[in-house]
Amino acid sequence: MQLRNVSRAICVLLMLSLSSTPALACTGISLKSADGAVIVSRTVEWALSDAKHDSLVLFPRNHPYTAQTPEGYNGLSWKGRYGFVSLRAYDQDYGPDGVNEVGLYVGMYYFPGFADFAPYDKTEAKRSVSVGDWMRWMLSSFKSVAEVRAAIADVRVVNVEDPRFGGAALPFHWKVADPTGASIVIEIINGGQVKVHETVLGVVTNSPTYDWHVTNLRNYLGLQQGPKNAVALDRVSLSPLGAGSGLLGLPGDFTPPSRFVRAAAFVASVRPLATAEDAVGESFRILDSFNIPIGSLAPTKDQAKDIPGATQITTASDLKNRVLYFHTMANRQVQKLDLKAIDFEKIPQQVLNSGTSRKQAILDITVDVKSGR
């Protein structure tokens, strides 16, 4: 009886914690094209309606930075070698996605229950950074995944409280990619232990740890692109009822394990892509399958008013040509920023508003009465 009561209490606490936690479900993939382009794409479901994902922040080359710690801005100081652009969130000078002027990509993905940053140590303050500072440090300092790998032991990511999210910093893991096609996921667990994982097809979602997701793929080895073969039972031949039988059993829910499997299956089945533009378009089509409608993850209809979990922006970063594409939940017109057109030596740090309406852009079709067209 006591064991049953304890189990019931644990379930109640778990339900309460889940109902009060933002549903930050993100899905990332990578595609390559025959012209050598590498496209890194993802959805962003950062919760709360004031996320302001449709603005960008630009940082110039040689910009000075000082990282934040629990004591203030007394952490790691450095001068950035590269300029970069980042999506914004909640008016922060960093956000879920960023790419620098030489094509290094860094993306933050929610990692609850497993992210566990290093405890703050005053004696280590000068090499300590917050989660946002760590992203900016990577984007401003390195040009390749190999350089990031070699340097990540030089800094300590520490928890810096944010009252907007219940006090603690949001738990993240990071995907890092470069124009060569190299791609890793960095996870910080067990009080600051850094784990680096090679990605499978560039796919990343959320919890649990990356190695668990890779192991879980073994449960889906029977999936295939083409249809299943007909099966003869006695004198009856049973054939598939329609297209898609090869993917029968592919999970369709929005949990991180299911999205990981679905993303891996879709990327593995991509047809040959000739150009970067082809790969950008295909990445948006694939990620359409991961769009989370407003309200579908809300415990009640009333909570859906504040978007507690929905796809708010989808991005595609062309690392070879250094172009950032995105569309938002309010306006699916694709916007782009060409980093090659920016003089990162001269620009000041600045916020860019997309300038596009937050209402869906719709093109009217006109009819020429005289010509019949």
Image (cartoon, rainbow, N blue to C red):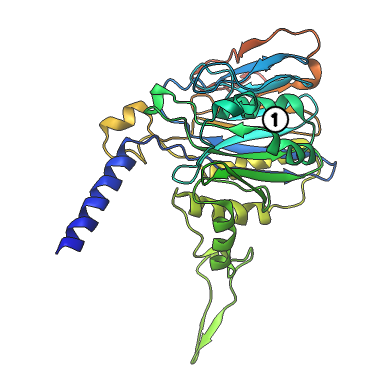
The residue most toward the bottom is 234
Q: Quadrant of residue 277?
A: top right
User: Which is more toward the observer, 278 or 373?
Assistant: 278
Instruction: Give percent across and percent down for residue 101.
Output: 78, 24
Q: In this orientation, which residue lies closer to the viewer: 268 or 255? A: 255
In the rendered view, tell whether residue 145 sits above or below residue 340.
below
Q: Is residue 82 above or below residue 242?
A: above
Can residue 33 be seen here?
yes
The image quadrant where one finds the N terminus is bottom left
User: Which residue extends farthest right?
Assistant: 35
Q: Residue at x 65, y 9 (%)?
A: 350
Q: Amino acid at mark 1?
A: Met
Front residue of 156 and 246 = 156
Percent position of residue 117, x then y: 53, 38
| Residue position for label 1 | 138
Q: At 31% from the left edge and 41% from the top edge, which residue is drawn? A: 17
Q: Quadrant of residue 124?
A: top right
> Residue 89 location, x and y as percent?
52, 22
Relative placement, left or right, of 215 versus 277 is left
Residue 328: x, y in percent? Answer: 54, 27
Q: Is residue 12 left or right of residue 311?
A: left
Q: Is residue 243 visible?
A: no
SS for dot 1: helix
- At horizontal 61% and vertical 54% (from top left) the residue drawn is 264
Q: Residue at x 64, y 63 (%)?
A: 225
Which image quarter is the C terminus in?
A: top right
